[in-house]
Amino acid sequence: MSALGTLAASVKGGLWQIAAILLVAVLIAVLSAGGTGWWMIASARDQALADLAAEKVVSEALRTSIREQNRAVEAAGDAKLLAEVRGKAAQQQAAANGRRLDPR
């Protein structure tokens, strides 16, 4: 074999090693990017779950305050009805007292 044939054979033989090294480098880069993406997604999920828990607490506090407001409005309505009944009774009592004291 000539020197040129030996050189060509060694380049041809070494070419698959270079291609294998390049493929391994690409595979490492893809796996690294995938792992980073997976980590970022998991981190975003955890943050979303924490935000959801905080919003549930706020939402429950708002529901509680709305229930308290509704109870206060109902109590005010009941008190108004009782006051109207007492007022009507007082008017009737005053009218009866007025007739009783009327000199006619």
Image (cartoon, rainbow, N blue to C red):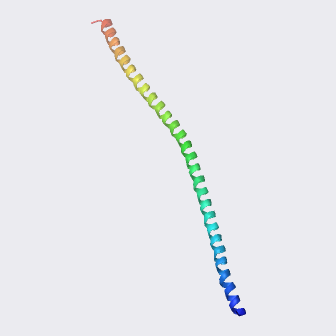
The residue shown at (55%, 47%) is 49
Q: Quadrant of residue 26?
A: bottom right
Residue 97 drawn at (x, y percent)? 34, 8
Image quadrant where one finds the C terminus: top left
- Tell me the residue at 61%/66% (across/down): 30
User: Can you give x and y, in whole percent of width and height, for residue 50 in the image?
Assistant: 58, 45
In the image, residue 60 above or below residue 48 = above
Q: Residue furthest left?
A: 104
Instruction: Look at the picture and state if 83 lies above or below 64.
Output: above
Residue with the most extreme front position: 1
Which residue lies at the image location 33% right of the left edge and 10% below the top edge?
98
Q: Is residue 98 left or right of residue 59?
A: left
Q: Residue furthest right?
A: 3
**Residue 89 vs residue 100, the one in the foreground:** 89
User: How many numbered circles are shown?
Assistant: 0
Q: Nearer the viewer, residue 50 or 4?
A: 4
Where residue 74 sits in the image (x, y, percent)? 42, 27
Q: Is residue 44 left or right of residue 7?
A: left
Q: For the N terminus, give its image quadrant.
A: bottom right
In the image, residue 42 above or below residue 13: above
Residue toward you, 96 or 82? 82
In percent of the image, x 38 and y 16: which residue is there? 86
